[in-house]
Amino acid sequence: MRFFRPRPLIAAAVAALVVAAVTHLATILSFFVGSNPQATVLLQINNFFVPSTVVLLVFVFIFALFTRLTRWYTAAIAGLVSGVLAALVGTGIQALVQGNTLDGGVISYLFSTLGSINLIFVLTATVATATIGRRVCVSMSSSAIVPRSVSGTVLVRRPPKNLSEGIVTHLERSEIDVELADEQWESYVAALIGAGWKPIEVDVADTLADSVFVEDSVVVFGRLAVLASPAAPSRVAEIDGVEKAVRAMGLDVTHIVQPGTLDGGDVLKIDRRVYVGRGGRTNAEGIRQLRHILSPFGYTVIAVPTSKALHLKSAVTALPDGTVIGYPPVVDDPKIFDRFLAVPEEAGSHVVVLSDDTVLMSSAAPESAQLIESLGYRVIAVDISEFEKLEACVTCLSVRVR
C-alpha cells in the first residue's frame, strides 16, 4: 500500500518526533519559568508530561501517515485532536499510577485539566503540528526524486549550438550561457529518468535554434501523434526530425497543414478535454483541423484566447487532478477552466505531470512549489534559467508518451 512505503513512514515518524519534542519542551519550560525555578520543579513537571508526550507522538504519527498533514487547517485539527487525547490518556496514566480508580470523579478531573494544567500542552501540540510538523512531513515526503518503474517514454531533443539565436517575443533578449544550458538540459533529463521515464532523443538539429523545445513539434494522444504546423518559418524544419522519431516508436502519425498553424505549446490536455490557445502561434484553421482529427476519438477541443503569453502552456498547465494552475496577469480568462488555482509566480504556472502524485517544476518558483506541495503533491524542482530567457518552461523540453 502507498501509505507503508519507506518515505511516508519516515516522514510521518520524523514529523511526530519533532511535534512531540517541541510540545514537551515548550510545556515544561512554560511551567518552569512561571514557577520557582528550581531543578526539582523542572524534574517533576517533566515526569508529569512524559506519558502525554509519548501518546502525542503516536497520535501525530498516525495522522501524519494517513493525511500527510498537507494542509495547515487539517494539520491543526490533527494536532488539536492528538493533543487532547494525549493529555487525557497521559494524565489518566498518572492518576492510575498514583492508585486512583478510573471512576466518574477521576474522569471529571481529567477533562478539567484541559482548561488548566494541560491547556498549554494542547495548544502547543496544535500549533506545532500545523506549522513545524506539517512542513517536516511535506518536505520529507516530496523533496527527493524517487526511482520508479518506467511510467512511459518521453521525447527530448538536445540544445542546438545556436540556442542563443532562439526566437524571443514577449521578453527582452538576454545573453544565453550555452554551456550552462547544456548542463541544465542534462539535469532535466536526469530528473525525468529518476521519476521513472525513459527518454528517447530526437536527433539534434544544430542549425535550428528553437529545436530543443520539442513540445511545440508534436502532440501525442495515446498512440496518435499529431505533428504541428509552426507559424514561425524558422521552425518548420524542426518537424522532420520529430516525425522520424515518433514513426520509429510505432505511433500513428497525422499532420496539421498550412494554412493552419499550431504549436504543441498551445495544447493543454485534461482527460478528454483539449484546450488550445488561439494566439500568435496557433490560428483558427489549426484549431479546426485538430478538432476534426480528434473528434472521432472522443476528445472535445476548446479554443482559448491567448494574448498575454507566447503559448497557452506558457500561461497555464494542469495538476494531475485536472486543476488548472496559472499566474493571473498572463491568463486571458481563468473562468474558461472548470477549476483554476492562481499561483504566486509566473514560473509556477508550469508543471510536467510525472505521475498521479508527482510534478516537475522550475526552481524559479519556490512559493508556487510550496503551494502545490501543500496540496499533497511531490514536487521535483529543476533549474532551467537559460531556457526561461527564451520564454520556455519545463513543459517545452519534453513530450510524454504513455
Image (cartoon, rainbow, N blue to C red):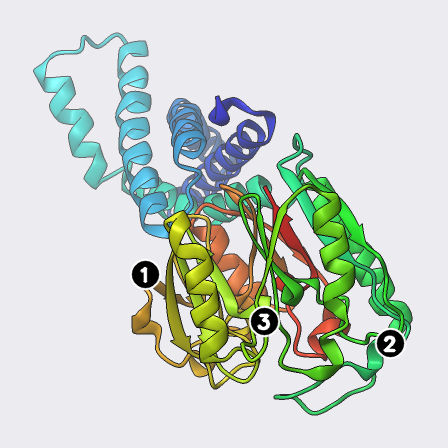
**Quadrant in the picture for residue 136:** top right
Q: Which mark is residue 177?
A: 2
280 or 91, which lies in front?
A: 280
Residue 339 is tagged as: 1
- Residue 287, percent from left and from top: 45, 71
> Considering depth in this image, is 214 or 290 the residue closer to the camera?
290
149 relative to 127 in the view: left or right: right
Give the class, few, some or many, for how many residues have Cα within 10 Å of label 3's Cα (few <14, many ≥20).
some
Image coordinates for residue 333, horizontal then vertical, percent: 35, 78
Q: Dot 1: what SS?
A: loop
- The residue sitting at 75% across, 69% down in the picture is 238
Q: Are marks 1 and 2 in contact (CB under 8 Å)?
A: no
Sooner in the amino-acid sequence: mark 3 or mark 2: 2
Three-letter code for the amino acid on which mark 1 is drawn: Arg
Q: Residues within 10 Å of mark 1 (few under 14, many from 20)?
A: few
Q: Is residue 94 visible?
A: yes
Please name the residue that numbered disc 3 is placed on: 257
Residue contact between numbered discs 3 and 2, judged by CB atoms under 8 Å: no
**Vertical comparison of 23 with 244: above or below:** above
| Identity, as a three-letter code, of the amino acid under mark 3 | Val
Residue 276 placed where, x, y %? 45, 69
Q: Is residue 190 left or right of residue 15?
A: right
Q: Report the amino acid beneath label 2.
A: Asp
Residue shown at the point (40%, 22%) measured from the top left? 51
